Image (cartoon, rainbow, N blue to C red):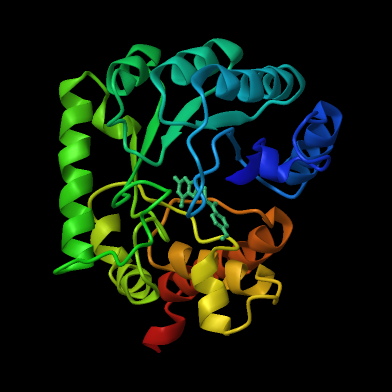
Amino acid sequence: MGILNVTPDSFSDGGRFYRLDDAMVQVDAMLRFGADIIDVGGESTRPGAQAVEEQAEIDRVVPVIEAISSRFDVVVSVDTSKASVISAAHSAGAGMVNDVRALREPGALAAAAATRLPVCLMHMKGEPRTMQQSPHYENVTTEVVDFLMGRRKACIEAGIRADQIVLDPGFGFGKTLTHNLELLSGLGVLCEQGPVLTGLSRKRMLGEILGDDSASRVTASVTAALLCVQRGASIVRVHDVEQTVQAIAVHLAASSADLQSVSTGYWNR
Ligand code: YH5
């Protein structure tokens, strides 16, 4: 899943005009490098970010979703928490709903169910503006898995099919570096519950591991994505599609070579 930000902090001119053509060039490149899904988000959920008005978010994402779905044969996912944005994005051609609030906002669950689209439910403790102010867990993996099971149950009760639900532990959302690393090491537990999406791309936790805030986080991001795939993630949400696809391609080729050598008895001589 390639990330396409349409938030003002990602606008090259400081937010007054978003260049649709620039976005299409970026989407075209991500698809050529092997992305299967393009995630379009109009609300910044970075730590400390302010909420965005409903109509402003629709005005940002709908033209982009329409442009992508009319030009490219790809699944467009909409990164939103708002019922009205979910409905508008669906009409514009979106093929998936990605919600960092796991459809807990008023009307969001019903709106998502009405679209019949697949949904990604993410765990977040608190709200973006305050979530990094000393988050606390007894056991972060248990708490995240329990939360996601509860949200999945709510989705199923609202009419969303179980096989249309993807789970996401929400790296960096109300978690310290230690929490994020615990979640990463327990990722296999979550992957036993169903398809999992992970997003670590360029996040602060990678900067914390590197101990250098000015460092490019590309290599760290690719490594993190590869780790998630090796531990069972089905979808990785990334900025650097080209490099991530290369890493995963090597991993998959080696895995299928392993399987072939097992079936041909190489290791059983
Ligand atoms: C996610 O994990 N994340 S938006 C801060 C950064 C860099 C990147 C400080 N939407 C996720 O990408 N949806 C976002 O540097 C998401 N899972 C799902 N499903 C935050 C983000 C970012 C934040």
Residue at 52 percent of width and 51 percent of height: 46
| Residue 12 falls left or right of residue 75 | right
Q: Is residue 88 above or below residue 146?
A: above
Q: Is residue 143 above or below residue 119?
A: below
Q: Position of residue 129 (x, y in %)?
A: 42, 49
Instruction: Please name whichever residue, 16 or 254, is drawn nearer the observer in this view of the structure.
Output: 16
Q: Position of residue 98 (x, y in %)?
A: 44, 35
Residue 157 visible? The answer is: yes
**Disc count in the image?**
0
Q: Position of residue 210 (x, y in %)?
A: 58, 83
Quadrant of the rendered structure where residue 262 is?
bottom left
Quadrant including the N terminus:
top right
Residue at 28 percent of width and 64 percent of height: 135
Q: Residue furthest bottom?
A: 269
Quadrant of the rendered structure where residue 150 is?
top left
Residue at 38 percent of width and 67 percent of height: 231
| Residue 4 falls left or right of residue 236 | right
Q: Position of residue 107 (x, y in %)?
A: 30, 17
Instruction: Please name whichever residue, 134 or 57, is drawn nearer the observer in this view of the structure.
Output: 134
Q: Is residue 200 above or below residue 57?
A: below
Instruction: Please name whichever residue, 26 or 71, is drawn nearer the observer in this view of the structure.
Output: 26
Quadrant including the C terminus:
bottom left
